[in-house]
Image: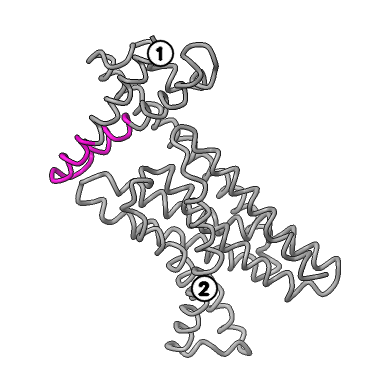
């Protein structure tokens, strides 16, 4: 019964969080199965390599003896954050070249999904290992579901945001952004673990998490606002070239695109998705290296052709 209850308590909150951050991606929502793939990596792959890395660091440095309090603290505050954040974040390096990974928002979603998957598995092990009584089990469920697992999602989400920013910016300084991102993720993780290691600092950990959650959603909002500006700018160019009516630009970049009536229902979704994709592709081309221009030109023209066909069907 404990195992079943712990399994439910570890899965449901993380899936709710996952759906929330997935739906926050307002303009170009990622394929949910691809998001789930990241979640699964966090739940299994990152857990395995995170534990392995932490053990190896402890073995190499001689800090594996858990009977010594200082060794345990070092494992929790230093080795675990380093190994776990690298284990979670390394998957983002494998998918960074995917056409689905477009920008800061995607990094927040994919990184957040990995962190939530990691938090789910870690929560389950805590629930069945330390939930000796109903009160202690409930306490763990609340604290870890609201704070610890969320920390994993935020730390890896912020790292993903740094990767998303660096991907399509060709300035040399941007090669440093992945390193800055992983350092910030490790710092967040280590600071949280340190704060909950002592009764005297517990409250500071909760305060830190409040500001981290606020920062994460603020970053999301900023990213979405920038995407809206990008869409307006790029589609205004297309309107100037008579691809789309100029009055459609503000509609496509706002919630009005979900309303029925301004364009035929059977082509509405295809039209605004194609227009938004076109805007993002144009910006990718501007921020990419020259040898990728031909590839982006082909993609851009294919979406222009699709939009022309859809608008012709709407007449």
**Distance from label 2 to label 1 (Cα)?**
57 Å
Kindly indicate the quadrant of the structure image that contains residue 57: bottom left
Above-or-below relation of 75 to 1: below
* Residue 309 falls inside the magenta stretch: no
**Residue 216, percent from left and from top:** 52, 45
| Label 1, residues with CA under 10 Å away: few <14, some 14-19, many ≥20 | some
Is residue 292 on the magenta stretch?
yes
Q: Residue at x 19, y 51 (%)?
A: 172
User: Dot 1 lies on which element?
Assistant: helix
- Residue 131 location (% of width, % of height): 78, 71
Q: Secondary structure at mark 2?
A: helix
- Residue at the far left: name it: 291
Q: What residue does disc 1 label?
A: 314
What span is in magenta?
278-298
Above-or-below relation of 88 to 166: below
Locate residue 36, reporting x and y percent: 53, 54
């Amino acid at each position: 019964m404990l195992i079943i209850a712990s399994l439910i308590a570890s899965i449901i909150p993380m899936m709710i969080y996952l759906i929330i951050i997935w739906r926050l991606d307002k303009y170009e929502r990622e394929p949910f199965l691809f998001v789930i793939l990241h979640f699964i990596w966090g739940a299994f792959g990152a857990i395995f390599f995170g534990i392995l890395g932490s053990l190896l660091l402890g073995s190499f440095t001689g800090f594996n003896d858990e009977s010594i309090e200082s060794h345990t603290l070092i494992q929790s505050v230093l080795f675990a954050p380093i190994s776990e954040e690298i284990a979670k974040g390394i998957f983002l390096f494998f998918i960074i070249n995917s056409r689905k990974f477009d920008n800061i928002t995607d990094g927040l979603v994919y990184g957040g999904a990995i962190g939530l998957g990691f938090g789910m598995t870690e929560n389950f092990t805590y629930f069945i290992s330390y939930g000796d009584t109903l009160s202690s089990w409930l306490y763990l469920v609340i604290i870890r579901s609201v704070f610890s697992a969320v920390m994993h999602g935020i730390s890896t989400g912020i790292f993903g945001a740094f990767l998303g920013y660096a991907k399509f910016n060709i300035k040399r300084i941007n090669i440093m952004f992945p390193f800055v991102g992983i350092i910030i993720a490790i710092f967040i993780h280590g600071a949280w673990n340190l704060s909950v290691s002592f009764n005297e600092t517990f409250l500071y950990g909760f305060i830190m998490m409040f500001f981290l959650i606020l920062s994460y959603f603020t970053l999301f909002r900023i990213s979405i606002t920038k995407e809206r500006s990008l869409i307006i700018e790029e589609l205004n160019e297309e309107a100037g070239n008579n691809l789309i009516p100029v009055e459609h630009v503000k509609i496509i970049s706002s919630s009005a695109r979900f309303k029925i009536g301004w364009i035929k229902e059977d082509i509405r979704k295809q039209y605004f998705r194609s227009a938004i994709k076109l805007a993002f592709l144009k910006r990718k081309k501007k921020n990419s290296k020259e040898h990728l221009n031909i590839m982006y030109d082909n993609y851009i023209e294919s979406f222009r052709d699709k939009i022309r066909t859809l608008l012709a069907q709407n007449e």
